[in-house]
Amino acid sequence: MSIVQRSSLQAIPAYKQGATPGTDEKAFKLSSNENPFPPLASVTAGIAAELGTINQYPNAAAPELVGVLAERLDVEPETIALGAGSVEVAGQLIHATTNPGDEVLFAWRSFEAYPILTHVAGATPVMVPLDSAGAHDLEAMAEAITERTSLVFICNPNNPTGTIVDTAAVDAFMAKVPAHVLVVIDEAYLHFNTSAETAIGMDFFRRYPNIAVLHTFSKAYGLAGMRIGYAVAPAAVAANLRKTAVPFGVSALAQRAALLSLEHEAELQTRIDELVAAREALLGTLRANGIATTESQANFIWLSTGEDTMRVDAALREAGIWARPFPGDGIRVSIGSAEANAIIAATLTSVLAEAPAHV
């Protein structure tokens, strides 16, 4: 007799982590949008000082971290809910706002965990195609809202295309969203977004009662391996997020690392500025060589290589660059070291010069 299992899981794909080059020391893993800089020395020292207490459970409420975040964001502490990375908090949001069969709406292609998390919660994903520029089509998303819609994700900048939504477009969208539908602005790549027109999640949180904002320490802060992120949401929603969270899901080490990172934001900002400059330099080089690229406001670039995606990805791997291909759509390549970025530019210039231009 076989063990009874949830039959619907057979139709749900497992989350696919960015590929790794394994033991090849000459290769660069640029498939997961990780920060290429090593952790701050102050952060690693602070974590080391906490190692003697790992036999104890962390404080699940994380009062010190929540207090600092509340003060910096100028919100009440009860509006903040933590999780093991913003992806876990996204799952909390879906579980807290949907009943079986309710709809979760988002652009596609966008963060690939959205449909997986939605299916796992027993809700129905509704994917609205991106526009021709690889950006959210907020008018089409508004038209796709039904009486079953409970939650909407807006990924800004969008993963994997790096495009943004502007303030005016989100305001127009919110005017069409029913008051009972929660709109989540996912800002995992906020720190790399230098656009003057971009919508800012916290601005919308202050102006609309049905907005939540997702932030993470994984990208700009370089704490991807520590797994810590948070939502700012209406207090009643945040309370339900804490109910759906895995108990003790955010370790004491992660809490300490986040606090130390907040204390050293000036040092981290220098690194962010370097990554943004490297992104713009790489995009400029590719365009100068006749390669059309999508404008990115994240720590990665996107190439709409379509049916040529796997050929281009194979060429990058041959050169030692492990990127993130999406067969039939395109390739996302994280910004890496100066050496890695030079290899990316040379390889893409060579391989795409042999094929029709891609936009």
Image: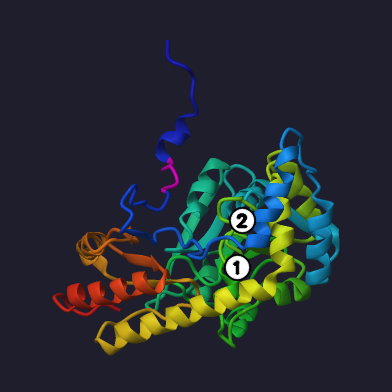
Rendered view: 281 above or below 135: below
Q: Quadrant of the C terminus?
A: bottom left
Where residue 309 appears, as percent x and y from the top left, is 25, 64
Where residue 121 appears, as percent x and y from the top left, is 58, 42
Answer with left or right where residue 295 lies relative to residue 310: right
Rendered view: 54 above or below 331: above
Report the amino acid beneath label 2: Ser
Report the amino acid beneath label 1: Glu
> Which residues make up the magenta segment?
12-16
Count how many numbered circles sit on residues in the image: 2
Indicate the secondary structure of the residue bearing disc 1. Answer: loop
Q: Quadrant of the N terminus?
A: top left
Whether residue 338 can be seen here? yes
Is 194 in the magenta?
A: no
Answer with left or right where residue 293 lies relative to residue 141: left
**Alpha-carbon distance for marks 2 and 1?**
9 Å
Q: Which residue does the numbered mark 1 point to in the structure image? A: 187
Whether residue 216 can be seen here? no
Residue 86 — which label?
2
The residue at the point 46 percent across, 60 percent down is 127
Residue lying furthest left: 354
Indicate the secondary structure of the residue bearing disc 2. Answer: helix
The residue at the point 26 percent across, 64 percent down is 316
Q: Quadrant of residue 200?
A: bottom right
Most foreground residue, 347 or 87: 347
